[in-house]
Image (spheres, helix red, strand yellow):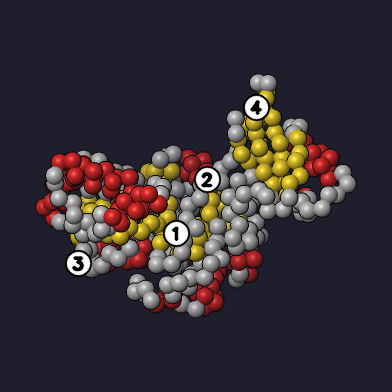
Amino acid sequence: MAEFYDVQEGADPQAREASLFAALVQALARAKADQPAWAGRLVGIDPAAITSRAALQSLPVLRKSDLAGMQRANPPFGGLNATPVGDLARLFISPGSIFDPEGHGRDWWGAARALHAAGIRRGDVVLNTFSYHLTPAGAMFESGAHALGCAVIPAGPGNTSEQLAAIAHYRPNAYIGTPDFLKILFDKAEETGQPADSLRRALVSGAAFPPSLQQEFSARGVAARQCYGTADLGIVAYEGDGPGMVVNEGVILEIVRPGTGEAMPNGEVGEVVVTRLNRDYPLFRFATGDLSCIMTEPATDGRTNHRIKGWMGRADQATKVKGMFVRPEQMAAIAHAMPELGRLRLVVTRSDEQDVMTLRAEHGAGVEGLRDRLAAKLAEVTKLKGAVEIVSPGSLPNDGKVIADER
């Protein structure tokens, strides 16, 4: 059995769900009463009625792509912050000109649990190579390390020679940062003959961590774990001792059909939508634009929360065909209009210097006129003509992709 950060990790799933939704009802009521931005988004919603995942789907989805416009119209945070700006702890700007707050309090971003699962403990010395300049990642992980009782070297990215000097002097036993930069440090240490063998544990994020790199770190004696988070939400999920990534406590995570707020069955790939119950900056049904799925395999480490497969790509699949945008929401509209179909995938290619769309749809036994009806619906929804292919159930990949631009 894994050593848990606290008893919540092994809590009864039904008790956890009841506690989360009780807190959600209160958070929605506060937001509707005190925050005009949320009051406007929650018109017609009775907070007391949002007591289940099914009821949660009645709330509108807030897309990350909407934040920039909201923040320009109502700076600095689009009216989504519950705590006045001057009472916050830090104010950040992330790539894409998205502005993010940090409030006061222990482990505000929820990083300590992920660090603990990676084997980092009180008294450890941690090299934190995430950026401290305007973006929140450096502060996010530092606050989690301090909550555990660790000393932190605030290294940030780059400056490899100086970082190796710090490693040689302070002998940190843990690393936080991207997996790529950890490899750079090890390679440079090998090249220059400087010691980096004190590093024995790592929590990595922000970049792909392929099996080949995992094996390389393991061969160097480094136990590395991954976590998944965003600048808006903090740490959403982390790697424990079992399969996949465990959803962080205090977070309600849904997987929805891309372009909609409709929940997908467990095991199906879709867009990650997160509700974060934070008093300073509550976010309800925040669509990240990332793809993942809820795992159906049983846990093996005693942690009882939902698990996701980790980051599986982007849900933002809009593309232009003959000068017109085609969006995942349109594919969802076709799926709703023709529920007898299985998975759909619109494939965009080029032929004779022209854009070509082909809609592939899963269906079992042939139905008279199905191809023609589907072609008509495709033209109606997208205002573009396209070919239709009917394929056997289960033949399209379970990867969350509904539009594949192959030009």
Residue type at mark 2: give it: Arg
Q: Position of residue 12 (x, y in %)?
A: 50, 78
Quadrant for the N terminus, please.
Answer: bottom left
Residue that carries the numbered disc 4 in the rendered image: 350
Task: Say few, some or many: other residues with alpha carbon within 10 Å of mark 3 (under 14 / 14 to 19 / 20 or more).
Answer: few
Q: CA distance from mark 4 to mark 1?
A: 39 Å
Q: Residue at 46% across / 64% down in the picture?
A: 243
- Tell me, yes or no, if residue 268 can be seen here: yes
- The residue lying furthest to the right in this view is 368
Q: Tell me which label, 2 or 3, sits earlier in the chain.
A: 3
Q: Tell me the SS state at disc 2.
A: loop
Q: Residue at 65% across / 34% down in the picture?
A: 348
Residue type at mark 4: give it: Arg
Q: Tell me the SS state at disc 1.
A: strand
Q: CA distance from mark 1 to mark 2?
A: 16 Å
Q: CA distance from mark 3 to mark 4?
A: 59 Å
Task: Say few, some or many: other residues with alpha carbon within 10 Å of mark 4 (under 14 / 14 to 19 / 20 or more).
Answer: few
Q: Tell me which label, 4 or 2, sits earlier in the chain.
A: 2
Residue type at mark 1: give it: Val
Dot 3 and dot 4 residues touching (CB under 8 Å) = no
Q: Position of residue 226 (x, y in %)?
A: 38, 56
Residue that carries the numbered disc 1 in the rendered image: 236
Residue that carries the numbered disc 3 in the rendered image: 123
Q: Compared with residue 54, is residue 153 higher up or lower down, i.e. above or below? A: above
Q: CA distance from mark 4 to mark 2?
A: 23 Å
